Image: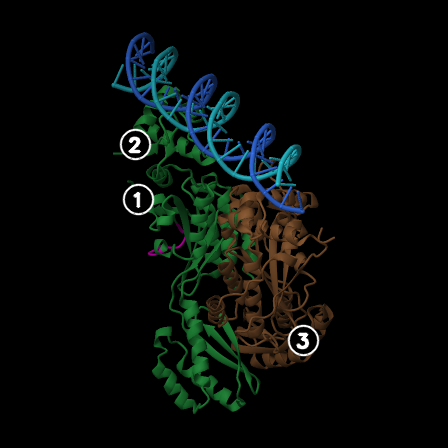
Chain colours: A green, B brown, C cyan, D blue
DNA sequence: TATTAGCACTCGTAAGACAAGAGTGCCAAC
DNA sequence: GTTGGCACTCTTGTCTTACGAGTGCTAATA
């Protein structure tokens, strides 16, 4: 059964007001604000029904109403006004994105910081699990005891490592190892670098000094690092400006959880297409610590068939509309800059699709 | 004028107790705990004098005493027992240090995290300002439009960048640029890379495609990044477990300040020798936001004549003794692993020197 | 049948009163 | 110089009370 039009309007008004004020909202306030021409008594009747339907609740008998997770869910799915960013806002984001993505080195951290600044909530950035391979292998001879390993990965990131040895190596050996590794270690996944492969390479190189295993270890480490989903969380302290986290213990619990890292991943699994924004409200979160917080996540195309996630965490009383708009725009901007190709041109707002648990109760 | 032996004992007892309980300590408690054979009335007389001398204060008339910054300072300089870590503790630190320093890539973050975990206070890790130069320059040709810049710095860190061009370049040009840059850009500081030098290199390379400036920009960026002191702060949320930060606003203020980054640097300037631990108590801090917090900083030898700093931030009621011992040990361990040479052998506790504002009032 | 005005009722919050307790300062005695 | 004793101060917790916001319900109205 669907709610009457008026109930929806009232619910939306309650959520809007509560998001703004963080205080239970009463019938009178709604009668005045929402433009439906009826008295507070009528509103009261409707509110009572919305309570019994589970969309609202009262902290106590004589207080106003507060949305339940179910209420927020309906609000997010159907009622809320899809915000578009103002021109200034979107230009600002683009500018900052350009400034930051110069050095893509730890872009994930920068992106997280940016999201947090934009939304004023703690933000997280995640890289998805991928199957990166090595594209090419270079060894730079520095001196008899030193060389630099340079590895370029299939996702076009480049890693290096300075290796210092107690023994001397000649350039010929370096040369030989370089071509051997280029021959047998490129295009393979982490799992395919077996002890067997390493040993056969070692034999082929006629390497009695253990160089092969040093280099192979670096290859494994690099691939491992690139394959492991990484999480970066910033701006935890912004939680403290939210009234629902005035209790230091509560704030501490959530902040420690967030600082702990990427436990949020399971929730972010099985993410759909690009530029979709997913909203997880209160108990919809799997993690116990997030059961009365909300998470908004956007996904972007990080190039090379990998996806990145970017999201924020806040109280269930979150400004979903604004946050979704900003994250969506941010994700689209990232896709455009990092992604494969067929992204919409800059400046164009992409359609905002919000998805989530639609069971509705 | 120096305090009487008994006053010192009493002051130490007050500070010790207050550090533990975070509550004003009364005469009776001291009479019982500290082993001086006198009654609470005597203690009261002494306490009154310590108050008028400025070492203690009372929150209100009928409360116990609380140390002032001056009191903490005396405690830190003269009174507190220098803790040594237990064997398990030091072994634990060494183990963790070994585990983390494998990948020295963003060691600074790991070190900061470790310090925070060990002390249960927010921790910061800083790199000092240095004058890094470029040691060698390599350009790896990938394809006609792509090459990898690899730069090895005088502090033995290696940076790379993948450059993708809209135009084609041939290997000869790459070769030429590589030797030119190795000839004129190595051994020079950031400031010495002038537009003039870049232009003359460009001419010498006969480069009409702007490659020179791309490479020079990378050199500047790399040197700039290595020279700029970087700060890494972790564990801000641990503040929330301290009773003095139960006020969310106060906690928020300090946490935002900390998240903001390396403003603490000025305080850490002009740092003395290795393995010295510096304590800055309350108003001794220059930053307004730190005026009623304390900072403990240790310095370590990061190799190549550069120093690193590692420290923690907490309430003035900080367990200085334990923190100083841990940071000192940590710093020594880092010096040993990163530093030049003449570090003490592993497992040996280095002498703990604590220095700070010794004006004493 | 839906809406509205009116009114009694509930319940959280703020303010004031009060007792308890911890700790002090001071004085007189040792 | 030290100590026991005692009156005094000030915070903290609890209780009471008054207030007010907001409700639910009923009866009147369109």
Q: Which mark is residue A113?
A: none
Q: Where's the C terminus of chain A, which quadrant?
A: top left
Q: Are marks 3 and 2 in contact (CB under 8 Å)?
A: no
Same subunit under labels 1 and 2?
A: yes
Position in image of residue A346 (x %, y %): 50, 53
Q: CA distance from mark 3 to mark 2?
A: 72 Å
Residue C2 higher or lower than B159, as above or below: above
- Specify the segment rendered in magenta: A269-277
Q: Earlier in the sequence, mark 1 or mark 2?
A: 2
Q: Is residue B358 left or right of residue A39?
A: right
| Label 1 environment density (alpha carbons within 10 Å; few <14, some 14–19, many ≥20) | few
Position in image of residue A3 (x %, y %): 30, 32
Residue A337 higher or lower than B56, as above or below: below
Q: Which mark is residue B185?
A: 3
Secondary element under disc 3, as helix, strand or loop, is loop
Q: Is residue D18 left or right of residue B333?
A: left
Residue B305 image-quadrant placement: bottom right
Disc tally is: 3
Q: Nearer the viewer, residue A55 or A59?
A: A59
Q: Residue at x 50, y 72 (%)?
A: A159
| Label 3 environment density (alpha carbons within 10 Å; few <14, some 14–19, many ≥20) | many
Position in image of residue B35 (x %, y %): 56, 53
Judging from the image, mark 3 belongs to the subunit labelled B
Q: Residue at x 65, y 77 (%)?
A: B181
Judging from the image, mark 1 belongs to the subunit labelled A
Q: Which mark is residue A358?
A: 1
**Residue under numbered circle 2:** A3
Residue B1, magenta (yes or no): no
Q: CA distance from mark 1 to mark 2?
A: 16 Å
Q: Residue at x 55, y 85 (%)?
A: A145
Q: CA distance from mark 1 to mark 3?
A: 60 Å
Q: Are marks 1 and 2 in contact (CB under 8 Å)?
A: no
């Amino acid at each position: 059964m669907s709610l009457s039009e008026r109930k929806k309007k009232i619910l939306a008004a309650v959520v809007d007001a509560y998001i703004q004020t963080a205080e239970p909202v009463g019938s009178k306030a709604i009668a005045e604000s929402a433009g439906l021409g009826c008295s507070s008594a009528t509103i009261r009747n409707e509110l009572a029904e919305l309570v019994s339907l589970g969309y609202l609740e009262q902290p106590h008998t004589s207080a106003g109403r507060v949305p339940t997770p179910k209420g927020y869910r309906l609000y997010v799915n159907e009622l809320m006004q899809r915000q578009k960013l103002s021109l200034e806002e979107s230009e600002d984001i683009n500018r900052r994105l350009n400034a930051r993505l110069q050095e893509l080195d730890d872009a994930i951290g920068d992106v997280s910081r940016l999201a947090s600044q934009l939304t004023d909530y703690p933000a997280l950035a995640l890289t998805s699990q991928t199957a990166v391979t090595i594209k090419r292998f270079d060894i730079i001879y520095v001196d008899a005891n030193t060389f630099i390993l340079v590895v370029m990965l299939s996702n076009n990131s480049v890693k290096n490592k300075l290796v210092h040895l107690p023994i001397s190596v000649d350039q010929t050996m370096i040369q030989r190892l370089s071509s051997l590794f280029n021959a047998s270690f490129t295009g393979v996944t982490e799992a395919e670098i077996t002890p067997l492969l390493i040993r056969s390479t070692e034999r082929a190189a006629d390497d009695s000094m253990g160089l092969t295993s040093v280099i192979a270890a670096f290859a494994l480490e690099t691939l491992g690092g690139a394959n492991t989903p990484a999480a970066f969380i910033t701006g935890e302290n912004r939680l403290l400006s939210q009234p629902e986290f005035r209790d230091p213990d509560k704030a501490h619990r959530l902040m420690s959880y967030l600082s702990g890292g990427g436990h949020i991943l399971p929730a972010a699994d099985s993410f759909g297409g690009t530029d979709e924004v997913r909203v997880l409200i209160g108990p919809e979160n799997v993690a116990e610590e997030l059961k009365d917080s909300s998470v908004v996540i956007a996904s972007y195309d990080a190039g090379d068939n990998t996806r990145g996630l970017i999201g924020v965490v806040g109280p269930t009383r979150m400004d979903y509309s604004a946050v979704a708009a900003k994250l969506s725009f941010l994700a689209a901007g990232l896709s455009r800059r990092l992604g494969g190709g067929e992204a919409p041109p800059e400046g164009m707002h992409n359609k905002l699709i919000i998805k989530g648990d639609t069971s509705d109760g």
